[in-house]
Amino acid sequence: MPHPGLIRTTLAAVALTTVLTGCGADSAADTSAGSAGSAISAKRCAENKDAGTITYLSGYQYQSSVSILEYVAAAKLGYFKDLCLNVVLKPGTGDTAQNTKLLASGQATVGPVAEQDVIQARANGIDLTGISSYSNAGLEVLMTNKDITKLTQLDGKVVGHKGYVPATVRAMLVKAGVKWDSLKLVKQGYDPSVLPRRQNGLAALTGFVSNEPNQLKAAGHPVTVWKPVDYGVPSSLGAMAVNTAFAKAHPHAVEDILRAALHAYDYCDAGEAHIAECVGYAAELSGPTYDKKLNTTIWKTETSYVKDHPTPGQPLGGIDPKNVAGIVDMLHQFEVVPGSVTVERAEGWFDTSYVKDIYAGAGVGGKLVWPAP
C-alpha cells in the first residue's frame, strides 16, 4: 500500500482537471453532524462562507494517516460546518507531484505536502504555501532483516526502493558511514514480504514507519527499522500546504480549516473508542475492502511518532523554521534543488501565522482556541 504524500509516480498524459474530477464520485457528501455557524462569530462565519467551496485533497486515498484522518473526521463530526466552511473531501492518488500541481492551479485548495516537497515544488515554479506540520520526524525509514545490526553492513548490498531512495534515508546512510556508491539500488513493488524472503539478494528496503513494518510484524516477520530522525536528519510529518492565492484572499478560512482539523485530531486521539469511530468514518468513504485493523495501527503509530518527536517550541501544527533550513541544506547536499534556493528564500514559502493565530498562548503550552472568535 502506498503511503500518503510520499510517492512520486510517473504521470500519465492526462489533464489534471480530469484527474481531480475523476475523484468526484468518492467525495465526502455533506452528511456531517454539526450546526452551521455554531462555533464562530456571525462576522467570521460570513467571511468563511464567502470563501466558497474548499477542496481538501488527501495524500493517499482515505488512509488513516495524520493529515488525512483528522480531516475526514472534521467533516463527519461537523467541525467544518460549525465554522461555516464548505469543505469537500477528495482522495489523492499518492502522487506528490500531481497534488502540488493541483494545489497550485486551484483545482484543490488544501492538502498534505511534506516540507521537503513544498521546497522542491517552489523551486520548480509551482506556487503553493506550507502552513503547518506536526513533527520534524519524517515517516520514511529503511528496513532490514535482524542479521543487519549496523548500517555499514549494507556496503555493496542490494537496497530496494519504490522508485527512488528518499533523500532522508540517503542522508541517514551517508551519516552512518555507508558507502553510497557501493549500494545496488533496485526498484521494488509494494509487497514488503520481498525483504524477509531476501528476494534477489535484497538486504534492505525503504518504507514508511507506520505501514510496511506493521504489515511485516502482523505476518510474523518483524524487521529492524532504521529511522532518519535518530540520525538527526530533518524531515516533516503531517505537513499541510494551501493554494497561495486562496490563502491571501481568505486568511481566516485557512486558520479555521486548521482549527477544525486540529480539533478533530484531539478527538480522534482521545482513546480507543474515538480511534475506532474516526477510522470508521474513513472506512465509510473507502468501501468494504478498507482494512480497519491496519489503518487503526497506522493512526496509532503516527500519532505516537508525533508525541515522541514534537516540533521544538511549537504547539501541535507549528512549523519549525530551523527544520526548513535543515531540509534546504540536505537538498543542497544531494543536489536536489539549485543553489538559488537559499534558506531565506525557502522560509518565505512557509507561513507560520495561521497556526499561531488559532492558539491562545505561545509555544508548546498554547491551547487551541475553540470555538473560533
Image (cartoon, rainbow, N blue to C red):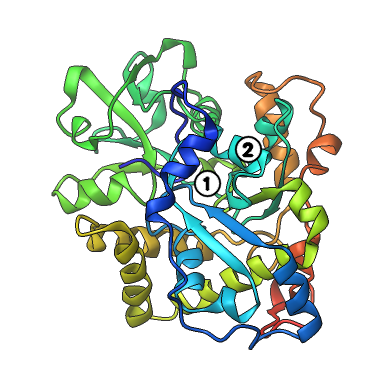
Residue 346 versus residue 285 in the image, above or below? above
Quadrant of the frame with the C terminus: bottom right
Q: Is residue 230 left or right of residue 219?
A: right
Q: In terms of secondary structure, where does tag 2 sit?
A: helix
* Residue named by callout 1: 138
Disc 1 marks which amino acid?
A: Gly
**Quadrant of res 257:** bottom right
Disc 2 marks which amino acid?
A: Gln
Query: Looking at the image, which is closer to me, 306 or 61?
Result: 61
Residue 160 coordinates in the image, percent (x, y): 33, 24
Mark 1, Cα crowd under 10 Å, few <14 / some 14-19 / many 20+, is many
Q: In terms of secondary structure, where does tag 1 sit?
A: loop
Residue 84 coordinates in the image, percent (x, y): 65, 76
Query: Which badge, 2 or 1, comes first in the chain's sequence?
Result: 2
Identity of the residue drawn at 29% across and 32% down: 148
Q: Is residue 218 left or right of residue 364?
A: left
- Which label is found at residue 370? none
Mark 2, Cα crowd under 10 Å, few <14 / some 14-19 / many 20+, is many
* Residue named by callout 2: 116
Query: Looking at the image, which is closer to me, 275 or 260?
Result: 260
Identity of the residue drawn at 55% across and 51% down: 237
Residue 261 coordinates in the image, percent (x, y): 57, 69
Q: Is residue 182 left or right of residue 257?
A: left
Whether residue 269 is visible:
no
What distance separates the C-alpha of mark 2 from that of mark 1? 10 Å
Identity of the residue drawn at 34% across and 76% down: 277
Q: Residue furthest right?
A: 344
Identity of the residue drawn at 70% across and 25% down: 124
Residue contact between numbered discs 2 and 1, judged by CB atoms under 8 Å: yes
Quadrant of the frame with the N terminus: top left
Residue 190 versus residue 227 in the image, above or below? above
